[in-house]
Structures are given as C-alpha cells and as structure tokens.
Image (tube, grey):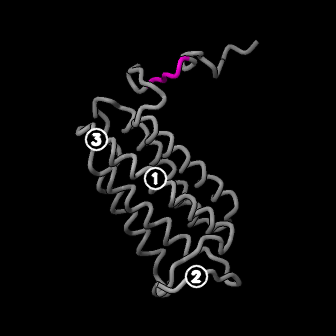
Amino acid sequence: MSEFRIYTRGGDGGETSLLYGVRVLKSDLRIEVIGTIDELSAVLGITRTIESDKHFCDIICRIQKELINFLSEVAAPDGSRCYITQENVNRIELDIDESGDGLPRLTEFVIAGEGKVSAFLHLARTICRRAERRLVELKQIDQKLSPTLLMYLNRLSDLLFVLSRSKKSNNVSAQYPL
C-alpha cells in the first residue's frame, strides 16, 4: 500500500482547512473564492492544451502561476501573504495592450463560440468575473485582503476578453450590433 494518501477524512463533516490550520465550512465565502479561482485556472489549462501559439501559452501559464499565488493570499486568514502586486496588474495591462493591437474597434456585441480557444477564453472570462464578485463580498467581511486582488481579477477578465477576440476563427462570425 502506498504511503501517500490523498484522502484525509478531515473534510467529511463539511469543513476544510485554510493556511495555518484554520478550519472553516466548505460553504465559507473564502472557500468559494478559492474554488472559483481553481475553476478558472482549470479552464485556462484546457485552453492551453488546444492552442499552439507559444507566446499565448506563455501568457496563460504565467497567469496560472499567478493564480496559485492568488489562492495562497486568499487562503491566509490573517492577511499575512501579499503575492499579487501592482506589478502583476501592470503586466496584465501590457498583455492587454499588446494582444489588442490590430484588433478592430468593437461595434457589435461578441457572442462566444467563434472558435474553440475563443470559446474557452470566454468561459474563463465569465468564471473570472464570478470570482471577482465573490471577492467583493469577501472583501466586505475581511478588510485585510489586499485591494490589488480585485484590481488583478478586473484586469484579468479584460485580458481574457481581448485574447478571446484575437483567437476567434476567421470563418466564424457571431456578433450582435451594439
């Protein structure tokens, strides 16, 4: 039998652990934020597996690594970890500017489904927005959370939108006039 077990039975009663052994209900808002960020990273991982553009994949992989830091910061109930910085926000803004260069001005609503990568990026964007909404709720309860976390998610959803526009298939158009 393996010495490593993934199961601990510690969550069988509906609780889980944050950093430093603090126990909370699995329905805790902090766990909801963490789970939503985890979901976002998983969808970004799927997106990376179906795209061959190295620069694109490097951006997504960097974001996934930053999301791990994001999770760690949210999981510290005492506000002791600050991994997401203004520098991370600035880097995403640069990504937005670079990825948006050459895209046509928006004159119509974009409908998801203009290609696999684009569709997964739209899904990631909506998950990111949900994480942002949950984080706003958590921030009202926990003032120790860095305001940079909200800025990061806000910029990240913008980046995912811009990337989705840049990855749409040329032969598919699903737009609706503004």
Residue 57, percent from left and from top: 59, 61
Res. 118 image quadrant: bottom right
SS class, disc 2: strand
Front label number (3 vs 2): 2
Task: Give the amino acid at mark 3.
Answer: Leu
Label at residue 130: 1
Q: Is residue 16 above or below residue 42?
A: above
Task: Give the amino acid at mark 2.
Answer: Gln
Q: Nearer the viewer, residue 36 or 82?
A: 36
Front label number (3 vs 1): 1
Residue name at image x 43 percent, y 42 percent: 33
Task: Give the amino acid at mark 1.
Answer: Arg
Res. 23 image quadrant: top left
Tag 2 residue = 175
Residue 168, percent from left and from top: 62, 76
Mark positioned earlier in the residue sequence (3 or 2): 3
Q: Is residue 127 above or below residue 16?
A: below
What residue range appears in magenta?
13-17
Contact check, label 3 and label 2, Cβ < 8 Å: no
Q: Answer with left or right where residue 3 lies relative to residue 55.
A: right
